[in-house]
Image (tube, grey):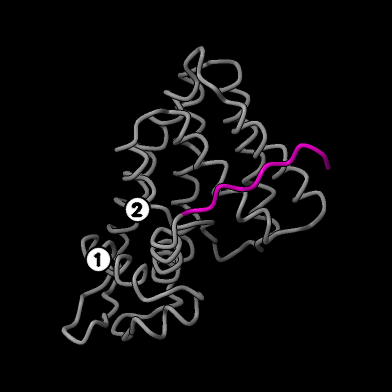
Amino acid sequence: MNGLKPIKMPSAKEKVAAELRKAILSRQMKEGEVLSLESVATQLNVSAMPVREAFQILARDGLIQLRKNKGAVVLGITETYIKEHYQLRAILESAAALLAAEPETDISEIESVYEEAEEALKEGNLKQYTDLNRAFHHEIWSAAGNQKMKNMISELWNGLSMGSMVSEEDYAKVSIKEHERIWRAIKAHDQKEAQKAMYDHIMRSRDDMLTYYK
């Protein structure tokens, strides 16, 4: 394909925080599990610094407890935590979508990423789709033009959420349809629809995660 642009990837700190958050929310990391800077850094192929920064983010969020030896312990999660986490994401991301749908906003990067994601899914490239899924959201945060909001959402990001009854491929197919609704609303500068479409998208992710949790 011609005219492709590099995918804007999260910072190392954001990548680590997102991966750890997703693992904790999906219970891949259990309550009481001990995390070390070195182990996490090795698994994610990053240096210790972004892991240390990610630990700070997750500690503030109540997902882990820091230890004096620079490690951390995974704390338990509750249904209430999951609901509150996704509600906050839904509020912030739907506000970003509303702002991105304003007339005169440059939405070319959103369109580019959406089209690349469609192509990746058609080709069955789920790994690339996962990257493009975040990139789609990232471009909406960027287009919104509110850096503080963007920073807050970045710290809350936890990637594709998986319900217990669907495969990654099935989830991606649902996700791209919802992204299409969001994109069409933004392209049409329909701010109310863009806001609602994004809110519904995040809350559906919440329901998936609650299914997994239960």
Image quadrant of residue 54? bottom left
Residue drawn at x 25%, y 66% as measured from the top left: 56
Which quadrant holds the C terminus?
bottom left
User: Start and end of the magenta stretch?
Assistant: 1-10
Q: Residue at x 23, y 67 (%)?
A: 59
Q: Considering the numbered disc 2 on the image, is that residue within a helix, a strand or a loop?
A: helix
Residue furthest out toward the left: 68
Q: How far, Cα to Cα, is label 1 from label 2?
A: 11 Å
In the displayed structure, does residue 99 sit left or right of residue 108?
Answer: left
Residue 192: image location, x then y, percent? 46, 19
Tell me the quarter of the picture where residue 87 sits: top left
Residue of label 1: 56
Is residue 101 placed above or below 47 in the rendered structure?
above
Task: Tell me, yes or no, whether the highlighted magenta stretch contains residue 6.
Answer: yes
- Residue 48 falls within the magenta-colored stretch: no
Tag shown at residue 155? 2
Mark 1: secondary structure: helix
